[in-house]
Image: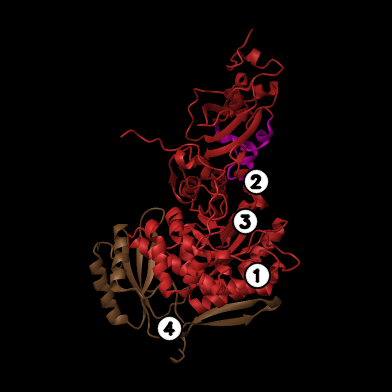
Amino acid sequence: MKLTQGQFSFLPDLTDADITLQVQYALENGWAIAIEYTSDPHPRNVYWSMWGNPMFDLRDAAGVLMELNACRAEHGHHYIKIVAFDSRKGWESVRMSFIVNRPAFEPGFELVRTEGPGRTVGYQLRSYTTTVAPTAP
Amino acid sequence: MDQSPDVKITDMKERYRSGVLKYRQMGYWEPDYEPKDTDVLAVFRITPQDGVDPEEAAAAVAGESSTATWTVVWTDRLTDSEYYRAKAYRVDPVPGTPGQYFAYIAYDLDLFEEGSIANLTASIIGNVFGFKPLKALRLEDMRIPAHYLKTFQGPATGIVVERERMNVFGRPLLGATMKPKLGLSGRNYGRVVYEALKGGLDFTKDDENINSQPFMHWRDRFLYCMEAVNKAQAETGEVKGTYLNVTAATMEDMYERAEFAKSLGSVIVMIDLVIGYTAIQSMAKWARRNDMILHLHRAGHSTYTRQKNHGVSFRVIAKWMRMAGVDHIHAGTVVGKLEGDPSVIAGVYDICRENHVPQNLQHGIFFDQPWASLKKLMPVASGGIHAGQMHQLLHYLGEDVVLQFGGGTIGHPQGIQAGAIANRVALEVMVKARNERRDIWNEGPQILAEAARWCQPLRAALDTWKDVTFNYASTDSVDFVPTPTAS
């Protein structure tokens, strides 16, 4: 499966030039860029690992790309996303979030159903990466 | 002693002689009054009957929406009636519209119960709207003081927390209303939900009149819809939601349905405006207590918001709903099939999303409106919109909005998933282009055409709906236009 979290997952993979323009947009808005990665993209897995702190003082997209490439070198087999954070009053949260790296094979999720009374079903989503991944086709 | 009918009577013996006085004589017209920061302010469009002068009509509106009755009553003297009287303090002719006036009225905060839309509206739009000396009356705008706002909960969730829960940032959210609105069985209905969410939408939605009818009872719908939501989540890795409409005949029924939705893991429930202000506030409090996003469908509003001479403007309804505490409100599309002048809609969107809305007559905003950190209300654009309009939608409505393509998803020639893909691709490509500082207003069609080269569903959507527009004059428009300055 293709994980479609983030702003641009329905588009062809972003090139470094594409990423630079998006980062530039965030920086022009005064947002801090962060790079995060994970092997478990469960939709409720909020806290991906941080590739260092958000780059509050970095105002140059080229610097972000350098950090991203360093992260890719180490975590190329993981999901990596770029996040733009807005600290301004009334927002104080994420403004942008898009995936910039994916594992070669994306195993996805198992939907586990637990039948309950009155035809209710309890649903559990389990990342295959956190159990035993199926082999690539 | 002769009294001019134009002035407030200050001699108390004269003032309280039994009989009928002009409202101005009773003290409801105070042209020198300086509104206090704590006053609730209202501006009404008044159309006086022939022979009724505008100041007297304004005074009558102030009187009938606060303390007055048609005749003098001595019991006024048992209280500080001067203080409790609403005061009409300004009357302006409506530009270019003979016979209509904007009447500004100030109400002391003590006239209203804390945190109660029902109480506020019982005064402001109570008896006064049927008052005979007026041909027509419209509540155009209100200024709610921060002091009063702080007695309201405000949106249960708010835009920022909704985005955090949905894990969607930097783009409008996408939704679709399930069609046909009525008649599907629960099992078939869930199929439509699944296809749309799997295809790429964030939300699907019950329509306003889907409650619990013979063809589909509510429990059945909720169960099938949650199967669809969870299956789509597993196949995309995204958080998905479906607005389960809990509108019902009684609060007990609505709570029961909302609790069931919660027990099934739904992130959102929905109500209709027709349930009434008190029921809306009750559901907003329930939603805050239960971590639930609360969607409001504005069913019924056009009966009183659409005609300019009589009723309540939608910008006022939007203010009341932000106070009442819903998280989503249908607020117009500009380009779709339903009423929506661009300037009016820009004003409504500001009311929903900004923390301070300055006076802007060209957008129909008559007063500075502070929001005192009440959470932001997510506007929803729904009704006759399609992927080919994406650049216009992003231009007019911005990023913090739910774009709902019902027919524009389900009516796709290659199926519902293809319809959802077309909308999602069109959206992402347009946001990407905007962030790249491309001129999406002018280049939009070209940007979509470029994407349609690699995205077949988008190509089919553009081909199907390329010529669909709804170009009709709006009935609700603003009265103030920018005056060209001499260069």
Q: Judge if badges 3 and 2 mark residues of a common chain.
A: yes
> Chain A colour?
brown
Q: Residue at x 58, y 15 (%)?
A: B10
- Image: B294 above or below B240: above
Q: Which residue is mark 4?
A: A106
Q: Judge if badges 4 and 3 mark residues of a common chain.
A: no
Looking at the rendered image, the quarter that the N terminus of chain B falls into is top right
Q: Which residue is mark 3?
A: B283
Mark 3 lies on a secondary structure that is helix
Whole-angstrom CA distance, mark 2 to mark 4, is 51 Å
Pinpoint the chain carrying mark 1.
B
Pinpoint the chain carrying mark 3.
B
Front label number (1 vs 3): 1
Q: What kind of residue is marked 4?
A: Glu
Please tell me whether residue B123 belongs to the stretch shown in magenta: yes
The mark nearer the N terminus, 2 or 1, is: 1
Q: What kind of residue is marked 1?
A: Phe
- Image: B264 above or below B400: below
Q: Which residue is mark 2?
A: B303
Q: What kind of residue is marked 3?
A: Met
Q: Residue at x 29, y 58 (%)?
A: A28
Q: Which residue is mark 1?
A: B222
Q: Which residues are magenta?
A: B103-131
Q: Residue at x 48, y 58 (%)?
A: B401
Front label number (2 vs 1): 2
Whole-angstrom CA distance, mark 2 to mark 1, is 30 Å
